[in-house]
Amino acid sequence: IGAGTSGRLGILDASECPPTYGVPPELVTGVIAGGTEAIFKAVEFAEDNTDEGWNDLKKYNISGKDVVIGIAASGTTPYV
């Protein structure tokens, strides 16, 4: 999960896991503040919402068997 350029790079890395490591596509998922639109175009202020980060993660039914990695260049992005 990330925002801005960090989020975009995380999505890029996630998309490379299946062909590089032979894992199923659903094993590694990239999540970015602002949704799919934010991959291609900046969605201003999406990274400033702490609640939205959690709401986006809930869509994936995360359990104790999952790992969530937050990517934030500043180290303090509220969404992440």
Image (spheres, rainbow, N blue to C red):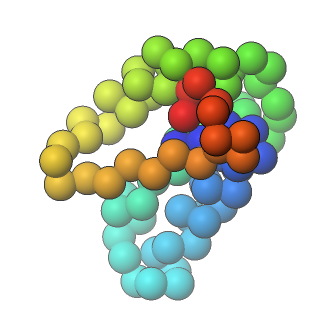
Q: Quadrant of the C terminus?
A: top right
* Residue in the foreground of this view, choosing between 36 and 64: 64
> Which residue corresponds to the image point at 18% horizontal and 43% vertical from the top-left?
63
The answer to whether 12 appears left or right of 69 in the picture is: right
Q: Is residue 80 above or below residue 48?
A: below
For the image shown, how many numbered marks are present on the structure?
Answer: 0
Q: Is residue 49 visible?
A: yes
Give the quadrant of residue 15.
bottom right
Spot occupied by residue 22 in the image (x, y as percentages of width and height): 40, 83
Give the quadrant of residue 47.
top right
The answer to whether 73 appears left or right of 51 in the picture is: right
The answer to whether 19 appears left or right of 61 in the picture is: right
Give the quadrant of residue 46.
top right
> Which residue corresponds to the image point at 18% horizontal and 54% vertical from the top-left?
65
Q: Is residue 35 visible?
A: no
Spot occupied by residue 28 in the image (x, y as percentages of width and height): 42, 60
> Which residue corresponds to the image point at 61% horizontal and 54% vertical from the top-left?
11
> Which residue corresponds to the image point at 77% horizontal and 24% vertical from the top-left?
43
Spot occupied by residue 5 in the image (x, y as percentages of width and height): 77, 46
* Residue in the foreground of this view, choosing between 7 and 27: 7
Residue lying farthest left? 64
Q: Is residue 75 above or below residue 76?
A: below
* Residue in the foreground of this view, choosing between 61 and 51: 51
* Residue in the foreground of this view, choosing between 25 and 44: 44
Q: Is residue 46 above or below residue 71?
A: above
